[in-house]
Image (tube, rainbow, N blue to C red):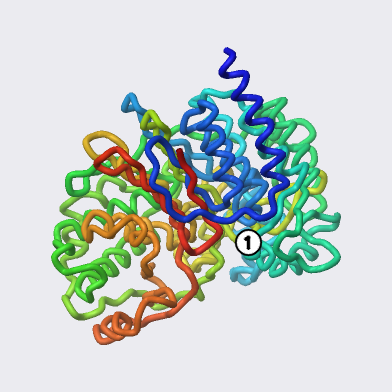
Amino acid sequence: MLRAFFSTIAILIVFPVLAQEKNYSSQKKIIVSKAAVVSAHPLASKVGLAMLKAGGNAMDAAIATQLALAVVFPSAGNIGGGGYTIAHFKNGRTLAIDYRETAPSKAQKNMFLDSAGNPVKGLSLKGALASGVPGAVAGIIKSSNFARFPLSRLIAPAITLAEKGFAITAAQAVSLNSNRADFLKFNASPIPFVKDSLWKRGDILIQPDLAQTLKRIRDKGLKGFYEGETAALIEKEMKRSHGIISRDDLKKYQPVTRKLLSFPYKKLEVLSMPLSSSGGLMLQQMLKMVERKNISAMGFQSPAAMQWMIEAERRSFADRAFYLGDNDMVKVPVMDITSDSYLEKLIADVQPGIAGKSLPSQHGQVHVSEETTHLSIIDKDGNAVSITTTLNDSYGSTLVIAGAGFIMNNEMDDFSIKEGHPNMYGAIGNAANAISPGKRMLSSMTPTIVLKNKKPYIIVGTPGGTTIPTSVFQTLVNLVDFNLSAEDAVNMPKFHHQWLPDTVDVEKDFGKEKIQALEKMGYKIRVRTAIGRTELIIVNADGTITAIADKRGDDDARGL
């Protein structure tokens, strides 16, 4: 009891200090002996580490980190969006919680189409109509059943960071300034993300309304968000902004506990998220397609190895477009499209040295703002948690709930707003992912845990829209097949193919020789900005833990 008391006092002391800290920096690599936290922001990672130091388990650290990200990483961390949590506990038990957003009860299939049946530009991307019913708070509270500490203790750091404010990073200043016009366009009331002058590194972002919302969640749990004052504020904002989420939609929202997707790869067991996320299923398809090709002998990012990986990505995304949707509401042939015989036939027509082709040719431009966020955690007992959450686009719909202080998602765009029409990430869908009341829109999030000898070996995930499954796929292949170091597996340049558009996206530092080799095969190459921000934890053979925070952002690794 005495130890718990002093641990609580230590937590209460440390968070005001974090809120006032201006000169913090990201820590990209650590090797530790007990536990580790990797997330998109240093202050959030420090919050998670403090929970572990105080005696909390991996879920305590995960929830506290997730809530802190809702404050210090507002472009993607959230309580106005949704996501997925998977876990593997020391007793062998596994967990998968689906708290993906749902379509409101007034939603209908053609709600984003004009009278001629064409998508209305921007309608599913910005403003109130673009938002699905948020699931993040329900997911957090359901996850708290597996934590040691009460929710009041886990949410306290986020409340402090919202009330006292925190110093933004240089990247966040650029991000906030870039979205200034949309914030002003879609919000009638003053919001904390816009000030008279432009933001700069070290400016303090204070979010008093968000702090009050978090306090209502602390005091009343689910009812503190999905009913009462917060629900009333959401409904009021929806009416003002011509949205369709009702108080009844909020009250009826339920997260779903699902059976974790599990499959073997080499001598390992891969655990990932099932539908309503496409990510785990696609990861299974891609890994199993290349498993039989001995790409390790071809060499890391050799032309031959890249071709097999690109063609696996192409075929998986084609299946995503044709077959995948919310398995609770449409029949998805999961067993058929993951069977060994099916996947062998799927990859059988690849011609070495000759690029494949994607048909039909209709596609849109791929949107490169891919604001989701991931966190990976392992504790001293070997409990592992992998969480990916999102608002969809950067700052979601850019609509802030007046008086409540949080940003709403724009996840309705992840439905197929018209069959064969690409969403903001260029992903094509059909009737399986059509809009329907209460339905979960298809996601690409891929929180993943890999077991070796039935114990956590790799904990991994990333943001990045449609690049999420391919980034996790490449990270695992880099580690397992090419024996790259943890640091190189995350930070070496990545590539991406998603069936349509029929192009291979590569990062700027990919290398001219590799690009030329792919072009010689017939691939069309597009050089683009960073792909993903992978958070990786590896448990080494000697029991030490290596944690890597992606070089591509403010991501941060902490441990003990």
Q: Residue at x 56, y 51 (%)?
A: 390
**Is residue 282 positioned above or below 120 on the image?**
above
Residue 76, horizontal then vertical, whole percent:
60, 54
Q: What kind of residue is marked 1?
A: Ser
The residue labelled by disc 1 is 124
Q: From this viewpoint, which residue is outermost toward the top?
A: 1
Residue 94, located in which quarter of the rendered image?
top left
In the image, is residue 362 above or below residue 345? below
Of residues 251 and 216, which is closer to you in this image?
216
Q: Nearer the viewer, residue 299 or 146?
A: 299
Does 347 sit left or right of 403 as displayed? Answer: left
Q: Position of residue 123 (x, y in %)?
A: 66, 64
Check the picture and name the quadrant holding the C terminus.
top left
Q: Residue at x 67, y 39 (%)?
A: 158
Q: Position of residue 203 (x, y in %)?
A: 75, 59
552 or 114: nearer the viewer = 552
Q: Where residue 478 sits: x, y (%)?
A: 28, 60
Q: Quadrant of the N terminus?
A: top right
Q: Is residue 401 left or right of residue 448?
A: right
Q: In the displayed structure, would residue 368 be above or below residue 534?
A: below
Indicate left or right for 356 with 131 as reference: left
Give me the residue at 61% from left, 31% from top. 154
**How many C-alpha atoms fall within 10 Å of the one at disc 1: few (<14), some, or many (≥20)?**
many
Residue drawn at x 33%, y 60% is 489
Quarter residue 159 falls in = top right
Where is residue 176, by image quadrant?
A: bottom right
Q: Nearer the viewer, residue 346 or 532?
A: 532
